[in-house]
Amino acid sequence: MGVQISAQMVLLAQSVLLGLAAGLLYDLLRALRLRLPRLTWMLDSLYCLALAVGAFLFLLRCSGG
């Protein structure tokens, strides 16, 4: 069993895409935060929860279980 560089590159690309998706979600929620300043805490909590779940599921899938 050797180190497969192509598999590592795919994982890197997937990690970058996950980061881009997190940034896009943050920007989408930013528009709501500007319109509804009272809900800033709730939207930030929702973002953190979504990101934590997404990162956890990503790590589970990439590590094989």
Image: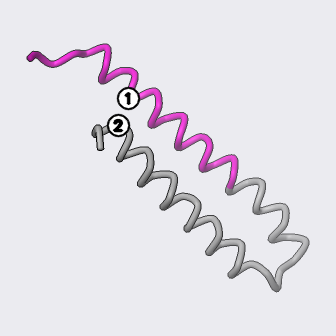
Q: Secondary structure at mark 1?
A: helix
Between 55 and 44, the one nearer to me in the picture: 55
Quarter of the view holding residue 65: top left
Between 53 and 29, the one nearer to me in the picture: 53
Q: Amino acid at mark 2?
A: Cys
Mark 2, Cα crowd under 10 Å, few <14 / some 14-19 / many 20+, is: few
The Cα atoms of the two marked residues, 2 and 1, are separated by: 8 Å
Answer above or below: position of 38 versus 9. Answer: below
Task: Give yes or no for residue 48 being in the magenta stretch.
Answer: no
Q: List x then y, in percent, for residue 14.
A: 47, 31
Q: Earlier in the sequence, mark 2 or mark 1?
A: 1
Q: Secondary structure at mark 2?
A: helix
Answer with left or right where residue 7 lies relative to residue 20. left
Residue occupied by mark 1? 11
Task: For marks 2 and 1, give the one nearer the viewer.
Answer: 2
Q: Amino acid at mark 1?
A: Leu
Q: List x then y, in percent, for residue 63.
A: 28, 40
Mark 1, Cα crowd under 10 Å, few <14 / some 14-19 / many 20+, is: few
Contact flag, marks 2 and 1 (Cβ < 8 Å): yes
Read off the magenta span.
Answer: 1-25
**Identity of the residue furthest to the right in this view:** 35
Point 82% across, 85% down: residue: 38
Residue occupied by mark 2? 62
